């Protein structure tokens, strides 16, 4: 069921949710959109946040000898590409990582469907920006807020106006695709070449900072180590030289090897094992890359002409 809400109605919806959940949202602070605590819907920005909200599910660093806490949180203003990232990660780590699982089960994500393609974005290639699966999905269009909710959260919309346009999301999706088009993936998992010159080309200017992994809404790799406070789990990056270093040596000593692994994981290995590409077209990795490596080049590159 699709509901049609006003701005005041959205505030009422927020208040209903805030009675059961601790609330956070995409919020503009000092010229940057970040996720922080909010006390009203009016604080929520509809702009894409400067970083992925995956920290709500995978902490940057935490002690894994502690018992996971089941804090109930609601996060407003998540973009569809970010929520799609969680759905893709679910295939690998939901019900396997207890920390991720307890947070996933106790967090509501209120995703906002984009009206404009973000700079460099290519979410249409991966099914965006309208999602088939969501907690509460919002489309702000023509001065109205069109809202739909999963059955688990339909109760929050009780009493609000039911929209006479029950096709607004599907129509928006079609119009968005017609307007922006999409990059043809064209079986990228079969077209990529192990010995492509692209990997060494990227390596010639990559500085191994790991920003692409940290900003990505689908990257979930971690490092585990012990220190004086316990056993820690923290974000890691397949680009870093130490990621594959073992007592027997480094299985990927060259940066070009590690870059190839990054893209093979996203566009081949995960597709073969889980049936999904490990990418949502959010373009965050490009936004944050200090040397402008563009993941779209991996998709559009003509490997046969090498």
Image (spheres, grey):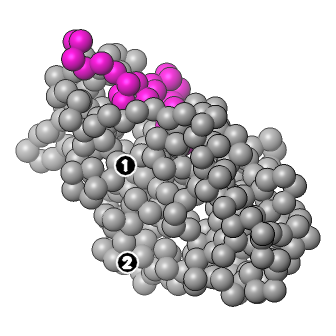
Q: Is residue 209 left or right of residue 201?
A: right
On residue 49, which mark appears? none
Q: Is residue 256 left or right of residue 184?
A: left
Residue at 45%, 67% (x, y): give it.
62
Element carrying mark 1: loop
Marks 2 and 1, how far apart in space? 21 Å
Q: Which residue is mark 1?
A: 278
- Residue 130 vs 100, above or below: the answer is above
Q: Please state which of residues 80 and 256 is positioned toward the viewer in this rendering.
A: 80
* Residue 38, percent from left and from top: 79, 67
Q: Is residue 214 visible?
A: no
Quarter of the rendering occupied by the N terminus? bottom right
Q: Which residue is mark 2?
A: 98
Element carrying mark 2: helix
Of the image marks 2 and 1, the number of the one nearer the N terminus: 2
Graded by Cα atoms within 10 Å as few (under 14), some (14 to 19) or many (20 or more), the crowding at tag 2 reads some
* Residue 284, percent from left and from top: 54, 40
The range drawn in magenta is 282-306
* Residue 214, percent from left and from top: 47, 46
Farthest residue toward the left? 248
């Amino acid at each position: 069921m699709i509901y049609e809400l006003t701005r005041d109605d959205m505030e009422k919806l927020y208040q209903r949710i805030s009675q059961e959940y601790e609330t956070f949202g995409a919020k503009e602070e000092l010229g940057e959109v970040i996720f922080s605590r909010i006390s009203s819907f009016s604080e929520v920005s509809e702009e894409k946040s400067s970083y992925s909200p995956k920290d709500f599910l995978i902490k940057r660093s935490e002690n894994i000898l502690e018992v996971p806490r089941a804090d109930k949180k609601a996060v407003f203003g998540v973009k569809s590409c970010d929520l799609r990232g969680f759905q893709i990660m679910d295939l690998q780590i939901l019900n396997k990582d207890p920390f991720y699982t307890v947070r996933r089960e106790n967090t509501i994500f209120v995703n906002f469907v984009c009206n404009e393609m973000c700079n460099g974005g290519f979410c249409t290639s991966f099914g965006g920006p309208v999602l088939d699966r969501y907690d509460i999905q919002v489309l702000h269009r023509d001065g109205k807020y069109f809202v739909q909710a999963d059955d688990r959260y339909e109760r929050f919309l009780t009493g609000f106006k039911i929209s006479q346009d029950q096709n607004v999301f599907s129509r928006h999706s079609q119009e968005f695709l017609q307007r922006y088009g999409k990059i043809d993936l064209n079986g990228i998992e079969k077209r990529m070449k192990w010995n492509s010159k692209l990997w060494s080309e990227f390596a010639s200017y990559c500085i191994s900072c790991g920003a692409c992994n940290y900003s990505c809404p689908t990257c979930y790799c971690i490092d585990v180590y012990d220190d004086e406070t316990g056993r820690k789990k923290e974000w890691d990056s397949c680009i870093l030289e130490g990621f594959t270093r073992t007592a027997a040596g480094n299985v990927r000593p060259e940066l070009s090897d590690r870059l190839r692994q990054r893209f093979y994981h996203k566009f081949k290995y995960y597709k073969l094992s889980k049936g999904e590409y490990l990418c949502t077209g959010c373009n965050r990795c490009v936004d944050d890359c200090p040397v402008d490596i563009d993941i779209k080049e991996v998709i559009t590159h003509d490997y046969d002409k090498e």
